[in-house]
Every structure is written in structure tokens, then in C-alpha cells.
Image: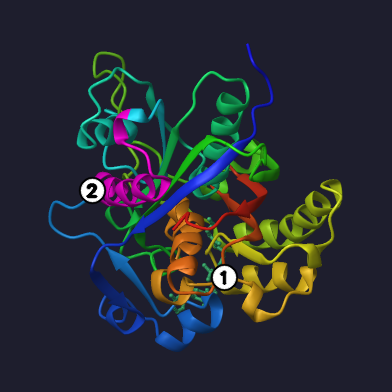
Amino acid sequence: MTNNIPLKIAGVGYSLPKTVVTNDDLTKLYDTSDEWIYSRTGIKERRVVSGEENAVDLGFDAAQKAIEKAGINPNEIDLIIAASSAPPELYPAIACHIQSKLGIEAHIPAFDITAACSGLLYGMQIGRAFISSGIYKNILIVATDNNSRLLDWSDRGTSILFGDGAGAMVLTPSDDGIDDIIAIDIKSNGSIGEYISLPLPGQNCPLVEPCSTKKFQIYMNGKEVYKFVVKILPGYIVDMIEQAGMKAEDIDYLIPHQANQRIIDAVQDRLGYSDDKVISNIKYYGNTSAASVPIALAEGVEKGKIKLGSTAILCGFGAGMTWGAAIVRLREGIC
Ligand code: COA
């Protein structure tokens, strides 16, 4: 088996539902205010799915854009990995739906991973291992979530935060020997998993015992998540940069998970970055979970906030608790 084949980030894309829910709209659901939400999170509005639209549709749209930018035919894809924390169903996997929607008839592998808002980073690490070892060539990662269907819309501490959306990335072997992933790392700490959870409904066999079931909705202890992330994330990123033999100023952009503007600010402060180096769109989309980093990347390029031919640090964290970061090269033409 060939080893250490360098990889290229060949294309990225994103997709958002059209329906906008503003902070003012939320005041119709519970006692809150635009001022309370914006000052604590940086969020003004979020997008939500409507009708029959779901994470598969958003993911398919984002995937098509990323594949087009990568300049490959869907039939050249060897593996699809989908990352989602709020999928429309547990199975079939989102990745299998996307294989079908892309019209890929070959029996390629397609599977979902559950790493919540670290999903893109987890997908990239898995994809890198497959490309590096020569097992698969063209890998599609789709990070997509329809959080709005699984939120408790009476829980004002949680439902203010999340929105829906999708991002996608195509990884291929690099044709010039340059690896676009300069450094990558993923982590988890299952002992604090209760900070954010989405228990499936279910009950024991009635022949065994009667029992109650939890509601199928997202639970979050926002305060503990906040404390944990602010404690570990800035140092984790600084260590990764150091271990890569780089300095913060060697990297052009920080593209963080969009969970809370105050968390983004904490990382920005630690890196000493000016505002133009930090990509933030949380004001308009809220926290789109797995989709948040690839949306920030693809939209940042589209809106001219990110110039290509540059380097960036991507970072994510979420339920699990999971977290991860990558220092990447962003080539011309990926978006
Ligand atoms: N509007 C008005 N008041 C609200 C409110 C809302 N939307 N949500 C909560 N409150 C109230 C609470 O009831 C509480 O009132 P009390 O003191 O009278 O009991 C008070 O505000 C403080 O609540 P608390 O939950 O401690 O707020 P907080 O300062 O921790 O802010 C978050 C809540 C969710 C904004 C914040 O914890 C956060 O952003 N955490 C990070 C979550 C995250 O990043 N999750 C995603 C990970 S991928």
C-alpha cells in the first residue's frame, strides 16, 4: 500500500435555507429580547428549514457546489462521509441519501459520523487517513444539520443559539506534492457528554417493564459548555500552531465554529488577530453545528473576506464533548 500521499482541498460549498427567524421573532415564543440574545451570543438571526426541506437537501446542494469547484464528476467520488448532529433520520445515513441524489450508481462506501460541531474536522481527519494510505482518492465530506426540527422551542436558553445549514468539502490526492493539511488533530472527552445531548426516544419492551421516555430534543447546559470551551480551546489552538512549527502570525485566517461570538473573541484575543483575520457570520446564521465551519469558509471566500492562496486555522467543538482543529492551505479555485 502507498503511504503518505499528500492531499488537496479541491472544492468547498455551502447551502442555507431561505427562512429567516430573527431575535425579535423569538419574543413571540418566550420572554427574551434581541438585546439579551445579541449581547450574550452575537446572534441576530438564524435560518431554519421549512416544509419538507431537510439536512439531506441542504447537504446535497452544498455537495454539488463543492464537487463542481473540485472539477470532478460525481461518479469519480470514492467515499462519502456525512457529519451531522441533527439528522432527519438515523438511517439511511445522510451520506447514502447524498450518494443517491448525486446519481452515483457505483457501490461506493457512504457513512455518517456523529461528532456534532466538530464534524468537519473529524471528517477531514478520516478522509486524510484514507487518501494518505491510498485506499480512496476522491472523498466528499458533507456537514449538514437541521437543528430547528430537534430544538425545544420553549427552551430559551438553547433554542436561541441554533440554526440550519450545510457545508461540503472535496478532498483529492494533491497533484503537486503539496499537502493542504499542514496539521490536524481531533479530540473528545466523553465524561462530560451530558453538557449537550440528543437522546433518541424509545422504551423497553412492554413485556419487560413499563417505562417513560425522554422527549426527542436537544438538551444543553450552556453555562458548562461555555466554561469548558473557553478554558480549553484557545490554548489548544496555540499548542497546535506551535507543534506545527509555526507562529500565529504565519496563518492568515481563523475560521472558527460559530457557536458564540464571545468564544470566537476569546480565541481571537489569544492569537492576537485583528478582526479582518477572523471569520464570523454567527450574527446571521447562529450555530449551524457541523455545517458552521464549512459555511464560514465557503461564504467567507464568496464574500471576499477570505483571499485564496492563503492559510487558515479551522476549529470546531461540540457535543461529545468533541473538539478539533486543522491548519490548512486554501488554494485558488476551491470556491
Ligand atoms: N432571554 C432572556 N433571559 C434568558 C434567556 C433568554 N433567551 N435564556 C436564559 N435566560 C435567563 C435565565 O433564565 C437566567 O435567569 P435567572 O438568573 O433568573 O435564572 C439568566 O438568563 C442566566 O441564564 P444562563 O443560562 O446562566 O445564561 P448564560 O449567561 O450562561 O447564557 C448562553 C446562556 C446559552 C447564551 C451561554 O451559556 C452560551 O452561549 N453558552 C455556550 C453554548 C454553546 O456554545 N453551545 C454550542 C456548543 S457547540
Query: Under tag 1, what secondary structure?
Result: loop
Q: Which residue appears at 75% of the width and 61% of the height?
A: 234
Name the residue type under label 2. Answer: Asp
Rendered location of residue 237, percent (x, y) = 75, 55
* 41 over 190 or under it: above or below: below
Rendered location of residue 65, percent (x, y) = 33, 52
Residue density around tag 2, few if under 14, some if 14–19, many if 20 or more, within 10 Å? many
Name the residue type under label 1. Answer: Ile
Q: Which residue appears at 51% of the width and 61% of the height?
A: 297
* Among numbered discs 1 and 2, the one appearing first in the sequence: 2
- Which range is magenta? 55-75
Rendered location of residue 255, percent (x, y) = 59, 62
Q: Which mark is residue 279?
A: 1
The residue that mark 2 highlights is 57
Magenta includes 70?
yes
Residue 97 location, quadrant? top left
Q: Which residue appears at 56% of the width and 24% of the height?
A: 130
Rendered location of residue 192, percent (x, y) = 63, 43
Instruction: Judge left or right: residue 147 versus residue 54.
Output: right
Q: Which residue appears at 79% of the width and 69% of the height?
A: 270
